[in-house]
Image (cartoon, rainbow, N blue to C red):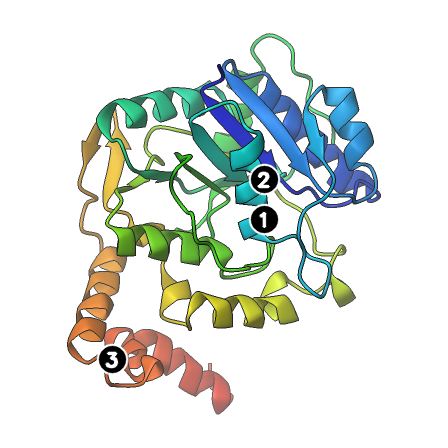
């Protein structure tokens, strides 16, 4: 029985660059031992890629009115069709290496209920990766020289026991808000939210947004507004990796160090709990005065 079921809803394989980075990502997954992979969707090229890479393909997944696959359907289908006790929803441009599997095993040994996530490393990759011996070391070296660690906002995978997340709203994949809700829900359920960034290197292959209308970022897509509504408002979608309860360091769980970003975030949550009757923006402006100042300067054209 595999340890993990990785599942994703790739973009169409029509754009040559998108096709390349998605095949790179999926290829890295299938090289991990004790892992099965499921690809969802009827987008062009998914069925053929699944066949070429020897992974399971489930074409039918529920979608919203704009045709975007829903997280709730993906998780439910993965739960019904997996042969493992752990599920991992992951974006199809993320490269995984053996340290990901090791971190998963360590988390399982430490907690019964948990959600595992991490910051990602961003890297420009335009060519197929040669998955020959030592490819992980070569890639890690390139990432350290040319890549950048993404800020602790925007999560690209969530790994959790199969019995978690039984009541997901109809959030759209690939649009802002769904990943924030996953963290919010875990915190509401008091599941340990484990940031494994100190122990793993997860590589995001940079890309544009040509697959979206007018090439605009998903933040400007109508599905994002619907995600925010379904999540319960802006307070829920402000949850990020800064809201993790633990970090995985050298096989042990530790409490995250109190950085200035974490202090600001904790202060904001404290204010929301005390002054729950105040508008969300007011609490944010109190907790993050610098951000408010930037908004004012932008409005009045100041630098």
Q: Are marks 1 and 2 in contact (CB under 8 Å)?
A: yes
How far across and down, in percent of the image, does residue 41 sit? 72, 43
Is the residue marked by circle 2 packed among few (<14), some (14-19), or many (20+) residues within 10 Å?
some
How far across and down, in percent of the image, does residue 249 sit? 25, 29
| Lateral position of residue 181 relative to residue 173, left or right | left
Give the residue at x 42% y 58%: 181
Q: Can residue 38 be seen in this view?
A: yes
Q: Name the residue under label 1.
A: 73
Give the residue at x 34% y 28%: 199
Give the residue at x 15% y 76%: 274
Q: Nearer the observer, disc 1 or disc 3?
A: 1
| Lateral position of residue 165 relative to residue 57, left or right | left
Measure how far apart labels 2 and 3 are at the Cα level: 42 Å
Q: Is residue 126 visible?
A: no
Residue furthest top in the image: 133
How far across and down, in percent of the image, does residue 173 sit? 59, 53
Q: Who is closer to the viewer here, 46 or 221?
A: 46
Image: 298 above or below 67: below
Is the residue marked by circle 3 packed among few (<14), some (14-19), or many (20+) residues within 10 Å?
some
Q: Are marks 1 and 3 in contact (CB under 8 Å)?
A: no
Please identify the quarter of the rendering in which residue 264 is found: bottom left
Image: 209 above or below 225: above
Q: Name the residue under label 3.
A: 286
Please identify the quarter of the rendering in which residue 212 is found: bottom right
Give the residue at x 61% y 20%: 30
Q: Name the residue under label 2.
A: 77
Reading the chain from its start, which is encountered first: label 1 or label 3? Answer: 1
Please identify the quarter of the rendering in which residue 51 is found: top right
Image: 269 above or below 25: below
């Amino acid at each position: 029985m595999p340890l993990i079921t990785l599942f994703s809803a790739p973009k169409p394989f029509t754009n040559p660059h998108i096709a390349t980075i998605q095949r790179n990502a999926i290829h890295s997954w299938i090289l991990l031992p004790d892992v099965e992979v499921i690809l969802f969707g009827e987008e062009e090229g998914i069925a053929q890629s699944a066949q070429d890479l020897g992974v399971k393909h489930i074409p039918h997944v529920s979608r919203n009115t704009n045709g975007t696959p829903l997280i709730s359907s993906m998780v439910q289908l993965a739960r019904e069709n997996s042969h493992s006790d752990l599920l991992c929803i992951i974006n199809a441009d993320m490269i995984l290496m053996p340290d990901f599997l090791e971190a998963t095993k360590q988390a399982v040994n430490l907690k019964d209920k948990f959600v595992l996530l991490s910051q990602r490393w961003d890297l420009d990759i335009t060519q197929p990766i040669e998955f020959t011996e030592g490819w992980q070391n070569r890639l890690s070296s390139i990432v350290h020289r040319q890549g950048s660690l993404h800020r602790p906002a925007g999560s690209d995978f969530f790994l959790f026991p199969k019995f978690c997340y039984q009541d997901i709203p109809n959030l759209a994949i690939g649009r802002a808000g769904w990943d924030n809700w996953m963290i919010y829900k875990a915190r509401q359920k008091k599941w340990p939210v484990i940031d494994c960034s100190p122990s793993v290197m997860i590589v995001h292959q940079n890309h544009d947004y040509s697959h979206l209308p007018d090439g605009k970022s998903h933040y400007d897509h109508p599905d994002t507004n619907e995600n925010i509504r379904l999540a319960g408002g802006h307070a829920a979608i402000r949850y990020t990796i800064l809201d993790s309860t633990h970090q995985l360091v050298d096989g042990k769980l530790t409490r995250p160090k109190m950085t200035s970003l974490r202090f600001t975030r904790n202060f904001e949550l404290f204010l929301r709990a005390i002054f729950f009757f105040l508008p969300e923006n007011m609490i944010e402006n109190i907790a993050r005065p610098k951000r408010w100042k930037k908004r004012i300067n932008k409005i009045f054209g100041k630098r």
